Amino acid sequence: MRFFIGRHGQRLGPFDEQAVRDQLAAGVIGLDDLVWREGLPAWQPVRNLFPPATAHASSGDPPPLPPPATPPPLPFTSTFATPAVAENVQPVATRLARRDARLGAFLLDLAVSLALAGPGLWWLMHAFAAVSPHVDIEALKAGTPSFADFQLLVLHLSAPLLAVLVPSLVLLVIQTWLLTTRGQTLGKKWLRIRIVRTDGRAADFVQVFLLRSMALQLVALIPVVGVLISVADPLLIFRADRRCLHDLLAGTTVIDA
């Protein structure tokens, strides 16, 4: 088995096990230097693989060398005394969520939004239809309603408007909390899929909400360009990696939970 040594920012090796023990005995490398062999997901302190009690023990002839393997890059830290160890590394997820599951999650989220805000929207439209004959619509369109018209609108539309906004804001808080803590919306949770970074780690608030959700919604407001981007965004899911434009922007992907 081949071992690589990380010392003072440089990668040394490969060495067989006996060579590592000989260098330990000679003081060429220390127990706080880093070591990696094929099969380890990350560099580890030498003391983890060669404890002091057995560091100088001879193990006889080393086993035959396996096929060449490339070690991962040395962890970028200020000192080798605090390396990234295996238990802190999360494996990269490779099971991508199905396209129909992602579409289903979107439709479920849309259905929840309509179920909560729909009654208020219906009430708001009927309230406006009832009050519109009594206000100057042209002045309202120009943004210069009279004070009497303004009072009439506030009187008749405040309650239905709150019936739309309050449940919508409650849902926004719930969805944002789920996205930030679990990488899921309600729809994604029900269909057992979630958003992660491309390396398998949990995505943060900036990625799942600001970049993945809000950024493209703001871009969609741009005339012509916004429409083109809104159309292109979901079509990219038919690529091999199933990442939409918002995934590419946020550095995320969607996997089975």
Image (tube, rainbow, N blue to C red):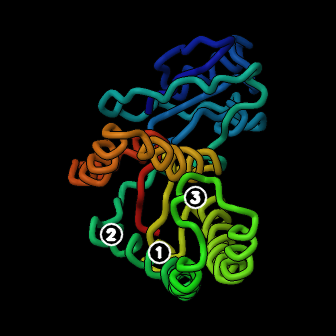
Q: Residue at x 60, y 33 (%)?
A: 43
Work out whether residue 186 or residue 57 is closer to the camera in this orientation and state it.
Answer: 186
Query: Given the image, on which type of amino acid does mark 2 rest?
Result: Leu
Instruction: Please give the name of the residue rendered at 54% of the width and 14% of the height, measured from the top-left corner.
Output: 12
Q: Earlier in the sequence, mark 2 or mark 1?
A: 2
Marks 2 and 1, how far apart at CA: 10 Å
Q: Along the line of sight, which residue is nearer the eye, 151 or 241?
A: 151
Residue located beneath label 1 in the image: 109
Q: Percent from the top left, x then y, of residue 165?
A: 66, 73
> The residue tagged with tag 2: helix, strand or loop?
helix
Instruction: Where is residue 45? Give x, y as percent.
Output: 69, 32
Neighbourhood count class around disc 1 (C-alpha, 10 Å): few under 14, some 14–19, many 20 upward: some
Q: Earlier in the sequence, mark 1 or mark 3?
A: 1
Question: What residue is at 46 percent from the left and 28 percent from the top?
Answer: 71
Asked if one can make out residue 74 in the rendered structure from this viewpoint, the answer is: yes
Which residue is under mark 3?
Answer: 139
